[in-house]
Image: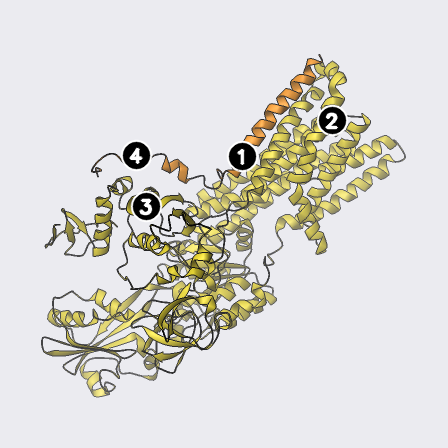
Amino acid sequence: MEIIFGLIVISLTVAVLFLLAFVWAVRSKQYDDTYTPAVRMLFEDNETQTPAKH
Amino acid sequence: MLTTAKLTPTRHACTHCGEDCPTHPILLRDKPFCCQGCKAVYELLDANNLCTYYALDEHPGQKVQEVELPGRFDYLDSETVQAQLLSFRSDTLARLTLMLPQMHCASCIYLLENLYKLNAGVSESRVNFLRKEISISYVPAETSLKEVVKLLASLGYEPQITLAELGAQPNHGSRAIYYKLGLAGFCFGNVMLLAFPDYLSFTDQLAHAFGRFFGFISLVLSLPVLLYSAQDFYRLAWAGLKQRYINLDFPISLGLTALFSVSSYEILTGTGPGYFDSFTGLVFFMLIGKWVQQHTYDALRFDRDFTSYFPVAVTLLTKEGEKSVSVKELQVGARILVRNQEVIPADAILMRGTGQIDYSFVSGESVPVAKVTGEVVYAGGRQVGEAVELEVVREVSQGYLTQLWNNPAFQKADKQTLETYANKVGRYFVAATLLIAAGAILYWYPRDQQMMWRAFTSVLVIACPCALSLATPFALGSALTAFGRWKFFLKNSNVAETLGRATTIVFDKTGTLTDVKRSAVEYSGPVLTPHEQQMLSAVVRQSTHPLSLRLAEELPQGSFTVTDFVEVPGQGLRGTVNGVVVKVGSAAFIEAEPSLEQARQAKLEPLTAETADNRQSRVYVSLDDDLAGCYVFRNVYRQDLREILADLGRRYRMAVLSGDNDTEQDRLRELFGPKAELRFHQTPQQKLDYIAELKRQGETVIMVGDGLNDAGALQQADAGIALTDTLSNFSPACDAILDAGSFGKLNTFLKFTQDCLQVVLATFVLSFVYNGVGLGLAVQGKFTPIVSAILMPISSLSVMLFATLLVRLAAYKRKL
């Protein structure tokens, strides 16, 4: 059963990694604007196309 | 380029802005445009393959203002202004964030993020839609700040650059709540897993072998929750205590401390598993409550003062010529030039030119005031008409208007709000808990000393009013969302509570009760022929005076040319059309007061003392010196005002504070009824004092206003509601911003806040039931960690759900 000690440590390490990922997400401004990126990804990138249709 | 103007009988929507085109739309490749400005934007986008803009949203464009003033943005070339606006600057890159209030749809995002196609010097532009901000990076060698701003303005997105923006760093809210919430959630999850073996009997063996190890890990995991995540509760409780005041955070802090101490003691002595899962869970749930409460409207600012209304720079006249300087550097004695539509930055004396100063926003006067050389003009007025030269007599911060902000009402960082129900209840809660805890000690002391400690600590633990603290944020948070749908934006949930408990409503007149954009035009006198109307129209179209503009809207457009046009500011207009001298203006200007004889002939009401006072909103017309008739401009009250006021009048004490003259007294008296207090010629300071007096009488006051002259009153009132026609426009510091279109719902809003308060009280009762059950178990010493672990999340979650659903139901019933 001593393996439990190891498993707990490993699981906590993984959990801490997720916590750090969350902290990184907040720091990199992902929670500052929760609307614009959702719209931005929908724009067609038609830089190379000639006359855009409308 | 094919640009033709041809007659089309049907109405067309402008391709760019979607507004109705005039009868002769400007056509470009068969697409109609309402004005040259809109056409120009279309051409620009078309030439750069950016017409996707029009595909994303129907009519995304803003009607482009045609008033392009020379040298309008020259101040952006000034070093001091740039230094304050740019957040980063080097030889190769400059970056800044601008506020674009006009941003409103996905098309805007598309266009604004493609700025680099329109100006090669722009390297990147990123939009934050919710905050209505754009971050622009550009290469200073290839373009300049002025060029970038000009481009934005020409597209119809003129950035809002005012004195307040200078030196202010873009505030990206506080991210601390996310860190705290994330950390608490992480610890809660892990501690819960570690606590699990304790709750299940078949893991007894496991618990024996690992119990202490798990306990220590839980302790370690709970420490950061106590020291970091729970910080705010302790800070607020301490702040309350320092003011000799017990708020809801006090019992929360007490409960958390008890919970943590008992658990640590049990783990360290090996006497039990502790309540760390309950502890971390409590903090986690209560932080969710705080997060909901913190929800704010990013794009709106509730803390604006006069600096948000004042310009950044002003044209200084020096011996060397015109120079753009920052308003902050303006000194007494400086000569400045104020052009059409510019705001006067400081109290000054008019030196040259004739002023037509629109004080509607500052003082509430509805008609522009004419000023002649030598008169004092006050800061905040907007010059309409020709450019004028002024000499500054007082520094910006010492002005007649700006002095208002020196009032103590503005000094407090957070104005003293009403005592919330939650805090009031919290205080009784503390008293009751301590009594019960003492009772438990007295009961168990002679019987079982160990049980005594257990009961005592359990009572303190259960006394943590977690569910109670969640009731208000969730109930009022849902209310805020409902209001948001109707464009009624509250600063925070406390405002909703204050609104629900208000007893008095005070209104401003100009711009609040009246709609400044609309005024009713009535004509009296012999009917003018269409031909005469067109001649008149041709003359008034030469002038920028608001009354002329309003009259021009009423009259049919003709194709006459006007010769010998003269505008005498504050008096009237004269022009010759087809050989006929057309005069439009005040009675004096039309040559002599119309005598009673003439007036009777022209079927006009004779000028009495009463109407003479209101002479400025009458415009007389004469053709070849024959008095033709007169146009009367009346204030137009907002739609449904009568019903709203009648309804409100039954439940609230009402008052009107107007900066304007008392010509409207009779109509207001009729609208408000005999009991309401009507005051006219009120200065901003008098408005503030009146509100303060009401508060001294024990009233809870709502102030509804719109202009800078109401700023003091809005601040002094328990809840200040700023009414605005366009949400992005300037509104003074206030507690709530209401879109003028929803003014008719004001009464429903107030009733709804009262519903919400009842929901809050009902939720309090629910949370008391949970606390009661917990206390019952605690005094008997049966409050074990497992009971705590079950009761705590159930109570928190059900309170959240209960509050949210009930408020939604109330909103549904009120049709909000």
Q: Which chain is orange?
A: A
Q: Which chain can be seen in yellow?
A: B
Which amino acid type is shown beneath numbered disc 4?
A: Glu
> Which amino acid is tagged 2?
Phe
Amino acid marked by disc 3: Leu
Label 3 and label 1: CA atoms lie apart by: 30 Å
- Frontmost residue, B289 versus B37: B37
Q: Name which residue lies at 46% across and 57% down.
A: B84
Q: Does the image show residue B31?
A: yes
The alpha-carbon separation of the residues under discs 2 and 4 comes to: 55 Å
Left or right: B492, with B428 as reference point: left
Rendered location of residue A37, percent (x, y): 41, 37
Read off the residue under disc 1.
Answer: A24
| Residue position marked by numbered label 4 in the rendering | A44
Residue depicted at x 64% and y 45%: B232
Labelled disc at residue B115: 3
Q: Is residue B656 visible?
A: no
Residue under numbered circle 2: B216
Q: How many marks?
A: 4
Chain letter of the residue carrying label 1: A
The quadrant where residue B36 appears:
bottom left
Percent x, y of residue B568:
26, 79
Residue at 20% in and 38% down? A51
> CA separation, marks 3 and 2?
57 Å
Say what amino acid the circle numbered 1 marks: Trp
> Is there one chain holding both mark 3 and mark 4?
no
Chain of the residue on which disc 2 is drawn:
B
